[in-house]
Image: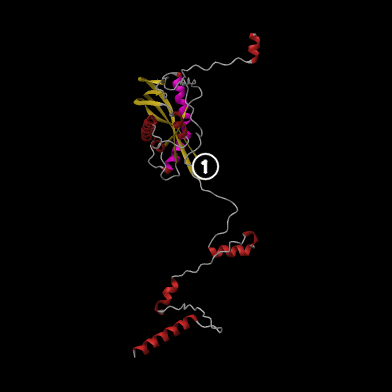
Amino acid sequence: MSGLLLNGMRHSLRLSQVGALGILPGGALEQRRFRKHWKPEFRWLRSKKVIKIKIPNLNEKPGDLTEDEMKSRLRERGLLPPRPWMERPFYISCTGGIFEPYVPPEGDGKMSSITKEGAKQKFEFIEKKSKSMMALRKIRNFEEDFDPPVFCKEAEQIYIKIHELMAQKEKYKIREFVTERAYPEIMHNVRDKTIHWKFLKSLDYPRLVHARCTDMISKDNIYAQVTVRFHTQQLLAIYDRFGRLLHGSEILAKDVLEYVVFERHMSHEYGTWRLHEKIIPDWMPPKEPGPVTYRVDDTPPPALEPTQEEATDEI
């Protein structure tokens, strides 16, 4: 009985193998692959595991396509047609200079208002005040609580903070208080130098003497510049990279009269007042440049060999 069962199992295995492989007419075996899953219950889910993508034709050249074919290709890929021009956004945070600069009167800070020259300066200041008042009115359209006396106190704090950062060479922190126009000049002036600066006191209250507004590119893009007069007492000493004194003194105080221009981008919601430039009048005599120091080599230069003409002259 067991022998019959074994023979039946062998016979069934042979039949299954023949059914899987197949028999050709010549008696050769043909391999067959059954692609049907043995459990068709999750057929729909198994079909979702494979994503069919359309491979683009890489040999297709855009120059060979017509205009309608190009539009259909772009529509298939969800792309917009290219534009014939290139546009890049840019942001102008400050102006490139001073528009309508203030001209300081000659002898300012030395003449009394009782004298003839001082009275003349007062009259010229009142004459130029009308344009400044119109500019202040435009500034108040963007900054309602703008008050010149209060702003002058804030400008004085900005002025002191900038000079302290210059002495410390804080090249990142100082960007919050100066414009992009003044930043490279400041960094160039403090390079390879040691600066000792100290603010002592104000000899006169800071005063707003000039205000102007201008637009750039469009009428809504407004920039405002105000000029503040500072008459202060300071200590300044500048040393070169070898520790030699170039300018000033650490014990001798000097009276300093400066006209500083502050600028703000009024159309910018988060714009702030920053130092833009200092006005140097034309009538001021030029300052003597600081002595340039350099390293001297102690070794003497090599002796030059005599030329052929010199040798013949000696003979």
- Tell me if 188 is positioned left or right of 168 in this view: right
Task: Please provide percent x and percent y for residue 59.
Answer: 61, 61
Instruction: Tally the marks.
Output: 1
Task: Please provide percent x and percent y for residue 12.
Answer: 42, 86
Task: Please provide percent x and percent y for residue 155.
Answer: 38, 33
* Residue at the extreme bottom: 1
Front-most of residues 136 and 197: 197
SS at mark 1 in the image: strand
Three-letter amino acid code at the position of disc 1: Met
Front-most of residues 264 and 253: 253
Question: Is 16 located above or below residue 247 in the figure?
Answer: below
Q: Quadrant of the N terminus?
A: bottom left
Q: Residues within 10 Å of mark 1 (few under 14, many from 20)?
A: few
Q: Quadrant of residue 176?
A: top left
* Residue at the extreme front: 3
Front-most of residues 219 and 56: 56
The structure residue drawn at horizontal position 45% and vertical position 19%, both measured from the top left corner, is 116
Disc 1 target residue = 216
The magenta-colored residue range is 117-141
The structure residue drawn at horizontal position 39% and vertical position 87%, both measured from the top left corner, is 7
Front-most of residues 130 and 289: 289
Q: Is residue 135 magenta?
A: yes
Question: Is 3 located above or below residue 225 in the figure?
Answer: below
* Picture colour scheme: secondary structure
Question: Is 20 located above or below residue 200 in the figure?
Answer: below
Task: Please provide percent x and percent y for residue 188.
Answer: 46, 30
Question: Is 300 located above or below residue 148 in the figure?
Answer: above
Q: Main secondary structure of the magenta part?
A: helix
Q: Quadrant of the C terminus?
A: top right
Q: Is residue 243 magenta?
A: no
